[in-house]
Amino acid sequence: MNETTAKADTELEVIFTPEAIAVRLDELAREIADARLENLLVVAILKGSFVFAADLIRALHRVGLTPEVDFMTLSSYKKARIASGQVSILRDMDLDVRGRNALIVDDVLDSGRTLAFAKDLLVARGAASIRTCVLLDKQLPRAVNLEPDYYAFLCPNEFVVGYGMDVAHRYRELPFVGRVVRQ
Ligand code: IMP
Ligand code: MG
């Protein structure tokens, strides 16, 4: 694949290739398997994590895990790149998390508000344990005190797209993580 991909009037620069992501996800799955979490429930935070979560659960399968999977749609970022600071549930999960070991999966850990919100919610609902797993850790000073239990990559402090992540609903379909060079 080329270093940059031209798409209409926009140019994207690849940060993490599909190959690098695949290798890293297998490592991540082994790390998660090492924790020996019984009765694991993966909770993927939509929309941004849907591609990552889909690949991660198949990597978990390859290392012998049999997680159940549920989804919760949270909103913090609206249409643009500006965080509203408030997190709300757009669509709740279906399964009961009480007494279960939960693994919350999200695409980007930025201010930490989204993950902190999800974590607090699962604590309140009686999860036995909660771990967090993100594709990208932006390592910025967080608005809340939260570090991920697992992350695939440290990420530059730039707005990234692709591999499920969007800007104004675009680019989710791309197989790589990239930055917008020109818009
Ligand atoms: P936080 O609540 O500030 O940690 O932001 C996390 C959420 O914001 C993630 O679930 C993402 O959906 C979104 N987000 C943060 N940074 C980016 C980015 O660079 N590209 C796309 N989405 C992002
Ligand atoms: Mg998100």
Image (cartoon, rainbow, N blue to C red):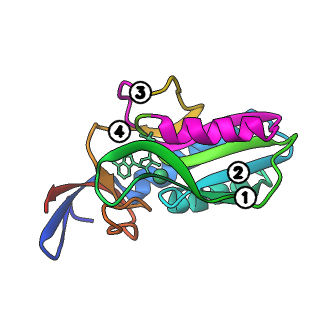
Determine the secondary structure under disc 1.
strand
Look at label 1 and name its amino acid: Val
Q: Quadrant of residue 117?
A: top right
Q: Quadrant of residue 116?
A: top right
| Residue 142, numbered label | 3
Residue 93 lies in the magenta stretch: no
Disc number lying in front (2 or 3): 3
* Sequence-first disc among 1 and 2: 2
Determine the secondary structure under disc 2.
strand
On the question of residue 46 being in view, the answer is yes
Determine the secondary structure under disc 3.
loop
Residue appearing at x 69%, y 43% in the figure: 103
Q: Are marks 1 and 3 in contact (CB under 8 Å)?
A: no
Q: Which residues are magenta?
A: 112-141
Q: Are marks 1 and 2 in contact (CB under 8 Å)?
A: yes
Q: Nearer the viewer, residue 11 or 77?
A: 77
